[in-house]
Image (cartoon, rainbow, N blue to C red):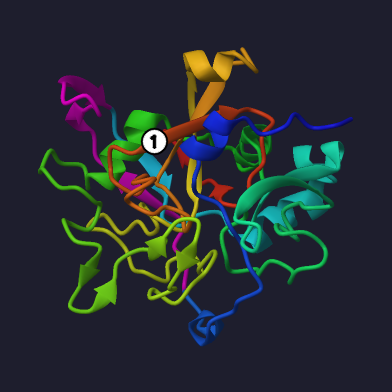
Amino acid sequence: MTKKLLTMSLIIGLLISSSSCHQPQAQAQSFAHASMIRVPGGMMIKQFEDGTSRSIAIKSFQLDADLVTVKQFDDFVKATGYITDAQKFGNSAVFDFDKKSWEMLDGAYYLYPQGKDHTKANPDHPVTQVSWNDALAYAKWKGERLPSEFEWEWAARNASNARQTYTWGEKLVEDGKYKANTWQGSFPEKNTEEDGFLTTSPVGYFGKNQLGISDMGGNVWQWCADKVAPTAEEAQSDTSMRHVSKGGSFLCDPSVCHGFRIIGSSSSTAETSLMHTGFRCAKD
């Protein structure tokens, strides 16, 4: 089976994926990962990109404190014999830093998100090259589910309606330290790697928000449960319903993709796997 070619709208809408063999010294550190955080319910004033807003009732729920790691997903695969969509198709979407473009690369999957000729994925980094179908299968195995877009955003807002751009506040850099793993420089020409990472960073490396949840901005896009219709441009090549992703990634240059804002979002079809997209789980 041959996977569909990436559409230009997908590439632009998800300007957010890359994984590389660059391994900063900081990645050798170890981070303790909590399980789930209770997010209290409330009435969220949802802010939309067009400047409008509306009230949305959110019931209390639990959300993974951290992104699902490569090791955790691999444990699931070993326990169940699960085969990911990328493995079924035989290829997956990879951003080539030399060519400065996306390509469908044979052999790329969650253990080798940039392909077999690159370094194996670090076990404590977020799992990538997992489709929405893969993420849902893992969540069901855990007796959990994927969060809704509004639940994810409410958790990123620290369960409040305080006006702020990012889950941590207003600035990407505070006291000389980066608050998230994003793209520094000009995408796709140059990444200065001032935050220490070209691609993924260890789960939880950049700290937690007020609720105790990490990576709610940057590192990797995160699948949500919600379905959305394709845009008019997307529908020209694929009329399939798509699933929302939140949080932005290490490929997000704010001048091109400001996805790590709380209100940022993107979407892809259920079988799509990308080197900058992962997930976390939720439950009632």
Q: Which residue is the site of mark 1?
A: 265
Residue at screen point 61% across, 62% down: 97
Quarter of image, res 58: top left
Figure quadrant of the N terminus: top right
- Magenta span: 32-58
Residue 37 drawn in magenta: yes
Label 1's element? Answer: strand
- The picture places residue 48, in percent across and down from the top left corner, at 23, 27
Side of 86 where 68 appears, left or right: left
- The picture places residue 24, in percent across and down from the top left corner, at 53, 82
- The picture places residue 234, in percent across and down from the top left corner, at 55, 20
Quarter of image, res 140: top right
Residue 229 in view here: no
Please identify the residue farthest to the right as the structure is shown.
Answer: 1
Side of 124 where 168 appears, left or right: left
Toward the viewer: 135 or 165?
165
Side of 94 where 263 appears, left or right: left
Residue 212 in view here: yes
Bin the neighbour count of mark 1 within 10 Å (Cα to Cα): few under 14, some 14-19, many 20 and up. Answer: many
Residue at screen point 69% across, 30% down: 271
In the image, what residue type sits under mark 1? Ser
Figure quadrant of the C terminus: top left
Side of 196 where 273 appears, left or right: right
Toward the viewer: 159 or 100?
100
Residue 100 drawn in magenta: no
Q: Is residue 114 above or below residue 81?
A: below
Residue at screen point 26% across, 54% down: 211
- The picture places residue 100, in percent across and down from the top left corner, at 60, 56
Residue at screen point 67% across, 63% down: 71
